[in-house]
Amino acid sequence: MSYTRLALYKILVVFLLIGCGGPPEKNPLLQEASSEYQKAENDSLIVTKAPVALKEAEEALEQSREFWKEGADKELIEHHAYISKQKVFIARETAELNAAQDEVKRAEAERQRVLIKARKAEARAAEHRAEEALSRAQKAQKRAEQLANRVSELEAQRTERGLVLTLGDVLFDFDKATLKPGGERAANNLAQFLKEYPERNVMIEGFTDIVGSADYNKKLSRRRANAVKRELIGQGISATRIQIRGYGEKYPVASNETEAGRQQNRRVEVIISDKNGTIDERSLAN
């Protein structure tokens, strides 16, 4: 290649890089989706019990990554990243459900084996034990199905702290801590969930944008969290199962530089405990 052609080639590469704006910025939602998928891919239960759902999560993630590499619209990237996260959740629930179904099959096979081998009197006792195991497995399967359905109905997201239900700013009047009808419906659905799962507790956390003083915002966020608590208590949920926190301007989920971002930050998050009633406190790193 001549010197002149080499120089022209270098100039062309520079212009291409300038036109592309350099490598795309990292996308938090895409990174989160990648992390969730990696956890699922390393989970042997999911790999063996829900390979189809896991493959769908991988495809959605790869699509999001391709859009990111191409510098596509952020909403398009995050749409496929969100789909990947939901597919991972479905894969996890499917794996647990299939495992429960396998347990039912094993229990039934054990019952048949014992009936054939044991003497008549012993077989009756063994059959009773096997039926109890079968009943427990069926209940566990049904419980897993019900939980998956109820979580879907609540539109809750699974996080490291547990299931999180987000009540947006539109469910409150501006600068007020009174739930609007839509917020009341969401609280009523949550109350029904807590009645169905009495072993679960909730942590209600309020947040605001940066408009106004920090002290006022912290008080407003706590009042909004308390409004949700009062609604749950009014629906028959014991106050001992409910904790509240008011964080004000802390822990934004979007930029406060735009109205859309500020609206996302004005929210109430309800964290639902694990089956032991435990909820991890929000870490300073979050």
Image (cartoon, rainbow, N blue to C red):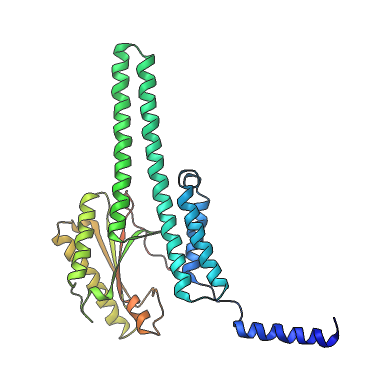
* 222 horizontally vs 230: left or right: right
Front residue of this view, candidates 267 and 278:
267
Percent from the top left, x then y, of residue 48? 49, 43
Q: Is residue 123 above or below residue 37?
A: above
The quarter of the image holding the C terminus is: bottom left
17 left or right of 71 in image: right
- Above or below residue 29? Residue 260 is below
Quarter of the figure with residue 214 = bottom left
Residue at (44%, 56%) from the top-left corner? Answer: 88
Closest to the observer, 215 or 276: 276
Residue at the spot 21% in from the left edge and 67% down from the top edge: 228
Q: Compare residues 100 and 251 and report the one nearer the observer.
A: 100
User: Which residue is farthest right?
Assistant: 2
Residue at the location (47% across, 49% down)?
52
Q: Quadrant of residue 225?
A: bottom left
The image shows residue 5 at horizontal and vertical percentages of: 81, 85
Question: In this rendering, does residue 206 appear at all?
Answer: no
Image point (70%, 82%), residue name: 13
Q: How many marks?
A: 0
| Quadrant for the N terminus in the image | bottom right
Q: Is residue 245 visible?
A: yes
Q: Position of residue 186 (x, y in %)?
A: 22, 64
In percent of width and height, residue 66 lies at 55, 68
Q: In the displayed structure, does residue 209 sit left or right of residue 193? A: right
